[in-house]
Amino acid sequence: MSISTAALRSSLFSFNGSASSLIGKGALLLVAGVIGTAAITEGASATLDAV
């Protein structure tokens, strides 16, 4: 989880540095989507393990 948080902060920092760049926005969305998917997958796994 801490790794995902660090990655998100890093991508947000990069995005702020190139806010006018469409490529920067696309990269931010891609990273956010990957992190979100990973978080959901981890949550689902934890739920299944608990059951």
Image: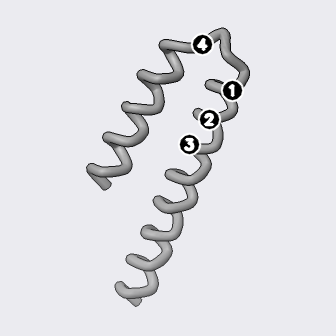
Nearer to us: label 3 or label 4: 4
Element at badge 1?
A: helix
Residue at the spot x=62%, y=35% of the render? 27
**Pointers 1 and 2 in contact (C-beta within 8 Å):** yes
Q: Is residue 30 above or below residue 35?
A: above
- Along the viewing direction, whichever of 12 and 22 lies nearer the viewer: 22
Structural crowding at the residue carrying mark 1, measured as other residues with C-alpha within 10 Å and reported as few (<14), some (14–19) or many (≥20): few
Residue labelled with disc 3: 32
Labels 4 and 2: the sequence-earlier one:
4
Name the secondary structure under disc 2.
Answer: helix
Amino acid type, mark 3: Ala
- For the point 47% across and 59% down, which residue is it? 39
Residue at position x 32%, y 40% from top? 6
Q: Which residue is mark 1?
A: 23
Dot 3 or dot 4, earlier in sequence: 4
- Residue type highlighted by circle 1: Ile
Marks 4 and 1, Cα distance to the nearest angstrom?
9 Å
Of the residues shown, which amino acid type is indicated by label 4?
Ala
Identity, as a three-letter code, of the amino acid under mark 2 = Ala
Cα separation between marks 1 and 2: 6 Å
**Mark 2 = which residue?**
27
- Where is mark 4, residue-wise? 19
- Relative placement, left or right, of 51 versus 41 is left
Relative to 32, residue 20 above or below = above
46 or 5: which is nearer to us?
A: 5
SS category of the residue bearing label 3: helix
x then y, percent, for residue 31: 55, 43
